[in-house]
Image: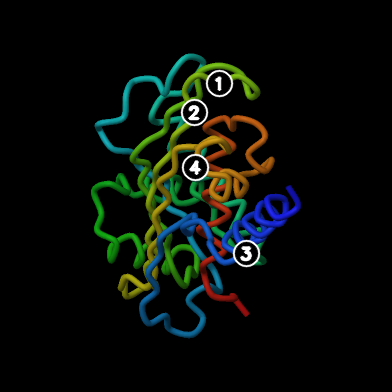
């Protein structure tokens, strides 16, 4: 019996050692190109768009695609400000577009970058697109279908408009019982089911954290 107990302890130690070296996949995938000095001095956030494939509503008690895009825009804007980055909010860009009879979707990144630089002194612009926004079905401790969110972000230097950074967030919450390492990284440590807004906010903060230090 003693030898069996020792074997069990040894196997448990090996399992724990394996867990200490295995890490879940990164929350976001990002690519950083050559970023000119001062690119993050003043970032103008362009109102995010959404794919036409998004359903009319994100699920029971969910939101429309337009609202989903607005929410992700706000989460990313807040995350930038929390890092100490000077931000020109999307509402200011919308006002500037309207004053000139323009829409951001009708302009190229170069055109938006030139406008943001001229009107606000922006050193870069951030554009985004929401590809998926599905609300969880059920409550936070008893969801039948988890929340699922996907979006991409692209940073362009201003006024030139060259792409200098991009990030993609694509997550459907997984339970601890399915993957303990992946489950524990969620807000709340995987002990509850997140709403789509909570998942999107976590993704926004994770994406912004991959930007280089602004100072």
Disc 3: CA contacts within 10 A as few (<14), some (14-19) or many (>=20): few
Q: Earlier in the sequence, mark 3 or mark 2?
A: 3
Closer-to-camera residue (26/38)? 26
Specify the quadrant of the image occupied by residue 175.
top right
* Residue lying at 34% horizontally and 20% vertically, measured from the top left: 56
Q: Tell me if residue 133 comes above or below residue 167 in the rendering.
A: above
Q: In this orientation, which residue lies closer to the viewer: 208 or 180?
A: 180
Q: For the residues carrying marks 2 and 4, which lies nearer the camera in this image?
A: 2
Name which of mark 4 and mark 3 comes first in the sequence.
3
Among the two numbered marks 2 and 4 on one chain, the one whose residue lies closer to the N terminus: 4
Residue 176 locus on image (x, y percent)? 58, 38
Q: Nearer the viewer, mark 1 or mark 3?
A: 3
Q: Secondary structure at mark 2?
A: loop
Task: Identify which residue is drawn at 53% across, 61% down.
Answer: 23
How far apart marks 1 and 2 lie (CA) works out to 6 Å
Q: Residue at x 40, y 60 (%)?
A: 29
Whole-Å distance between the Cαs marked 2 and 4?
18 Å
Q: Which residue is mark 2?
A: 146
Mark 2, Cα crowd under 10 Å, few <14 / some 14-19 / many 20+, is many
Q: Residues within 10 Å of mark 1 (few under 14, many from 20)?
A: some
- Identify the residue position indicated by label 1 in the image: 143
Residue designated by label 3: 17
The mark nearer the N terminus, 1 or 3, is: 3
Callouts 3 and 2 close, C-beta under 8 Å: no
User: Which residue is label 4 attached to?
Assistant: 72
Q: Whole-Å distance between the Cαs marked 4 and 1?
A: 22 Å
């Amino acid at each position: 019996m003693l030898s069996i107990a020792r074997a069990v302890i040894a196997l448990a130690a090996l399992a724990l050692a394996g867990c200490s070296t295995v890490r879940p996949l990164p929350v976001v995938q990002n690519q950083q190109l050559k970023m000119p000095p001062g690119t993050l001095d003043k970032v103008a956030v362009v109102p995010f768009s959404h794919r036409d494939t998004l359903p009319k509503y994100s699920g029971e008690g969910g939101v429309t695609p337009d609202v989903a895009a607005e929410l992700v825009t706000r989460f990313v804007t807040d995350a930038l400000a929390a890092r100490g980055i000077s931000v020109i909010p999307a509402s200011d860009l919308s006002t500037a577009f309207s004053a000139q009879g323009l829409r951001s979707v009708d302009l190229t990144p170069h055109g938006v970058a030139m406008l943001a630089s001229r009107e606000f002194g922006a050193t870069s612009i951030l554009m985004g697109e929401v590809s998926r926004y599905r609300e969880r079905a059920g409550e936070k401790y008893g969801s039948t279908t988890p929340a699922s969110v996907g979006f991409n972000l692209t940073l362009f230097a201003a006024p030139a408009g060259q792409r200098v950074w991009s990030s993609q967030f694509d997550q459907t919450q997984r339970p601890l019982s399915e993957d303990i390492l992946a489950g524990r990284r969620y807000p709340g440590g995987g002990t509850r089911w997140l709403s789509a807004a909570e998942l999107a906010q976590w993704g926004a903060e994770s994406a912004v954290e991959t930007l280089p230090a602004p100072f």
